Amino acid sequence: MAKKSTPEPQTPWEQYQTTHPKPLAAQLPQLSAWRHKQLRRNLVLILTPLIVLLGFFGYMISPLAKVGEVNVTGVKVLPEQTIIDASQLSNRNYILQLLFDKHPVVNRVEKVAGVKSAHVKISGMNTVTLQISEYAPVGYVYQKGLYYLVLSSNQVVKQGIKNPSDNYPVLTGFTAKELPRISTALRAIPKAVRQDIAEVKATRGGANPYQVKLNMGDGNQVIADSRTLAKKMHYYPSVVADLKQSGTLDLEVGAFFTPNKTKKN
């Protein structure tokens, strides 16, 4: 069995050091370092909020805090400026306010005839993009020398144009109450057929208040009932495929074709 070692006896000086604390002078370096550490910590706690506040106030008074540019995407029918004007966005609007509450801008834009939905996107520092989804155009109404678009929402665009560059049909003779019916009927016609319709007239002939006449791009005329127009026009391509000349196709009841009279030499 190993013999336990006994600790060596301390000298009187070592015993004194053990029983008496170190003098204050010996503790000063540690105390000074602790105080410097606390001072730095307090400065960070005080200066950080001040720097953040100064940066925030500096940003708020700078041009970057307000709307700098407004872009519009998704419009094919409506003028971009119409959307921008409706949004009421300008360099007086703050980006932060818009970031937290976009609904007022969206609501104003969605009140524009032809706008199906609107979204606001903020990119960069102060660029605002209005992302628009439109109602599809159905045709034009002609009034006082201008053509006004009729949309699938049955709304009429307020801005008229003199010379349409697209191939939407012109709707003539329809009252404001009749436009929704003919608009709905045209939307249900296959696109390939609809694009060949040049004009739709409200003729109201033969004691039928719903009678309409369609002038087709292929030279034919179609007489139909607006209530059954969409269904009957589905068969138009197959019917005219067997015709050897242009004429009038009556689709009110059944299908009757009358060829155009040829001029005799």
Image (tube, rainbow, N blue to C red):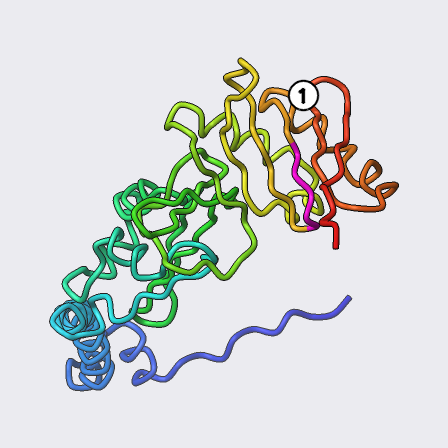
Q: Nearer the viewer, residue 55 or 263?
A: 263
Residue 174, how many percent across, how many down? Answer: 43, 30
Residue 136, how many percent across, how many down? Answer: 52, 45
Image quadrant assignment for residue 150: top left
94 vs 177: above or below: below
Image side of residue 57 versus residue 34, left or right: left
Find out whether residue 186 is within the magenta segment: no
Image side of residue 44 versus residue 219, left or right: left
Find out whether residue 219 is within the magenta segment: yes
131 vs 142: above or below: below
Amino acid marked by disc 1: Glu
Do we see residue 37 in this rendering? yes
Image quadrant assignment for residue 213: top right
Image side of residue 246 versus residue 67, left or right: right
- Image quarter where the C terminus lies is bottom right
Q: Which residue reaches farthest front? A: 265
Q: Residue at x 19, y 63 (%)?
A: 90
Residue 225, how many percent across, how many down? Answer: 61, 22
Magenta stretch in the rendered image: 218-222
Residue count near mark 1 (Cα–Cα under 10 Å), binned few <14, some 14–19, many ≥20: many
Residue 178, how many percent across, how many down? Answer: 44, 25
**Which residue lies under the disc numbered 1?**
252
231 vs 218: above or below: above
- Image quarter where the N terminus lies is bottom right
Q: Residue at x 56, y 73 (%)?
A: 6
Q: Nearer the viewer, residue 17 or 137?
A: 137
